[in-house]
Image (cartoon, rainbow, N blue to C red):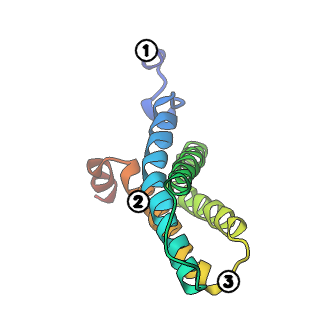
Amino acid sequence: MTASLGIPHAARRPGWAPWVRGALLGALLGLTFLGIGGRIAMRAIATTQGAPTGFSVGGTFTVIMLGAVSGLVAGLLYTASRVMLRRHPPLARIVFGGVLLAITLRGLNPVDTTRLLLFLPLFVVFGVALDRLWEPRSDRTAAIR
């Protein structure tokens, strides 16, 4: 209906689709990188500190689900940056990267070299994967031309 009013497609407000896409992509990538990757990083930290090897199924499940929830929230933050700055995608990426870095550093308690080396790459890979999967490849290649 808005097209019949003479409003160009690019000027219309996005509906729910980007929000659902951001939440689902974020949750899936969060489960994978933040949850499973975070659990592996936690095991590595425990090993370097001389803790006995082993894990609990309940604890592992909790960490993985927290990764999915964190990813969902980050996916919504990514969507917000892309919607608010839709005419400036590079700026949206920078804003999202800064917010993601701030949240990551806030979550690392205490911040030390080991935690930075193990957890920061997980968030970088998460953020890059979210950005790469956000747009279909055809849209990215069309924008380059």
Q: Which sits in the foreground, 58 or 32?
A: 58
Q: In the image, residue 19 lies at what x, y percent?
A: 52, 36
The reply to whether residue 121 is in sight is no
Label 3 packing within 10 angstroms: few (<14), some (14-19), many (20+): few
Q: Is residue 93 above or below residue 121?
A: above
The amino acid on which the numbered mark 3 sits, given as a three-letter code, is Asp
State the image quarter where residue 83 is shown: top right
Quadrant into which the C terminus falls = bottom left
> Is label 1 in contact with label 3 (beta carbons under 8 Å)?
no
Q: Helix or strand or loop: what does disc 2 sit on?
A: helix
Q: What element carries label 1?
A: helix
Q: Name the residue under label 3.
A: 112
State left or right for residue 144 relative to residue 24: left
Q: Name the amino acid type tagged 2.
A: Ala
Is residue 125 among what the camera can see?
yes
Residue 56, percent across and down?
Answer: 52, 59
Q: Nearer the viewer, residue 104 or 44?
A: 44
Q: Which kind of residue does numbered mark 1 sit on?
A: Ser
Q: Position of residue 95 (x, y in %)?
A: 62, 60
Look at mark 1 in the image and give the residue it sits on: 4
Label 1, residues with CA under 10 Å away: few <14, some 14-19, many ≥20: few
The disc label shown at residue 129, or none: 2
Select label 1 or label 2 by which is in front: 2
Q: Label 2: few (<14), some or many (≥20) within 10 Å?
A: some
